[in-house]
Image (cartoon, rainbow, N blue to C red):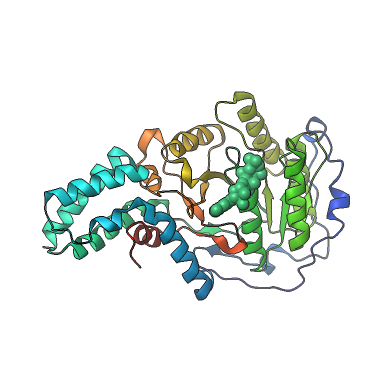
Amino acid sequence: MFRFFRKKDRQESPQALAEATGAPEVDELADKPRAEPSAGLTTASDIIVDSIEQPIQQPARQSWMSRLRQGLARTSIGGIFVGSKLDESLYEELESALIMADAGVQASTALINSLRQKVRKDRLQSAAEVRQALADVLTEHLQPLQKPFEVGSVKPLVVMIAGVNGAGKTTSIGKLAHALQSRGARVLLAAGDTFRAAAREQLIEWGNRNDVAVIAQEGGDPAAVAFDAVSAGHARDMDVVMVDTAGRLPTQLHLMEELKKIRRVIHKADQTAPHEVLLVVDGNTGQNALAQVKAFDDALTLTGLIVTKLDGTAKGGVLAALASGAQGCRPVPVYWIGVGEQLEDLQPFVAREFAQAMLGLD
Ligand SMILES: Nc1nc2c(ncn2[C@@H]2O[C@H](COP(=O)(O)OP(=O)(O)OP(=O)(O)O)[C@@H](O)[C@H]2O)c(=O)[nH]1
Ligand SMILES: [Mg+2]
């Protein structure tokens, strides 16, 4: 379920870019009270964008599902069932395939044990039945990662986005802004990647094309940009403020410190923020994704993940490893998954769909 009311008066500010220049230095800003919302604008009660857990329209959905299935077909777990007999070697093959699909030993063993129990209990006979049973077991296993992305309970919802270089942060922000905006939410973006000039341009250009305001600053401190964006989000009565950040490796300790500072400064601009701290993970990263989740979670206390590029060579099993808390990772919810470069290619994570796709089932 998601409920959207109001699509009226979406007046994105064309002067955003002009206003965007010259965000003050953080230290100067740190103790200032945040900007008051302007009078005469809509109030929080005018918009209820409750939660997003449901897919978009049917036709787009079908093509999206088929892309997810094609992407995850590389796990070749589905193929194992073709012409197979239900015997010990089937379980062994399935366990190896799960491990090869990045699910890790711990989750793979647990899944196969649950499958054996289910086969016995339900007296399943055929390979086709076992295939569906594995999809059920996998769905149950992944369920704790499924959580709707809530918008509308606070205003503006401040979302900070982090991740390693090239994971898909900026693209995902664009897609997410598009999804939220098309449902009536007023969205403001912060070009917090002040490290690469091209990154700022990428977000600004995207904002221009889609009529979404972008707060940017030439060079300077990303935390100052974030502060400015959160203040502007309040002043302009925005529903969502999304803060992009530069890519970094968890081993680059000074850059991880910079991220923590951005988080602290966002909190100074709005004592309730950030409301969401999302890590964008490239689905092709395999088991290394777990190390990324752990490191960014330790630094920032993540509230959710976006897993991208599942249309590529990704095998998807890493979500099973994440759900089982492997390598000391907290099972952080997966809000969204990306299966392509188009705007509609970011969709809510639904455990059942993901499990079916991993097993090549409809
Ligand atoms: N196939 C595919 N490509 C994607 C997906 N998400 C992002 N990309 C591509 O990945 C590349 C990097 O995306 P960016 O959004 O620039 O990544 P980033 O994390 O912002 O990169 P940095 O800012 O350099 O750290 C771009 O070519 C995107 O089009 C996806 O779900 N599927
Ligand atoms: Mg980027």
Q: Nearer the viewer, residue 64 or 182?
A: 64
| Residue at 64% across, 24% down | 254
Return the x and y of residue 31 as percentages of the image width and height.
78, 34
Image-based side of 104 in relation to 289, left or right: left
Residue 107, visible in the rendered structure: yes
Residue 275, visible in the rendered structure: no
For the C terminus, which image quadrant?
bottom left
| 356 versus 221 height, above or below | below
| Residue at 55% across, 30% down | 250
Return the x and y of residue 67 as percentages of the image width and height.
47, 62
Image-based side of 176 in relation to 138, left or right: right
Task: State the image quarter where residue 180 is shown.
Answer: bottom right
| 49 versus 99 height, above or below | below
Return the x and y of residue 170 as percentages of the image width and height.
65, 48
Return the x and y of residue 255 as percentages of the image width and height.
64, 29
| 343 versus 224 height, above or below | below
Q: Nearer the viewer, residue 174 or 93?
A: 93
| Residue at 41% across, 37% down | 329
Image-based side of 124 in relation to 326, left or right: left
| Residue at 28% across, 38% down | 105
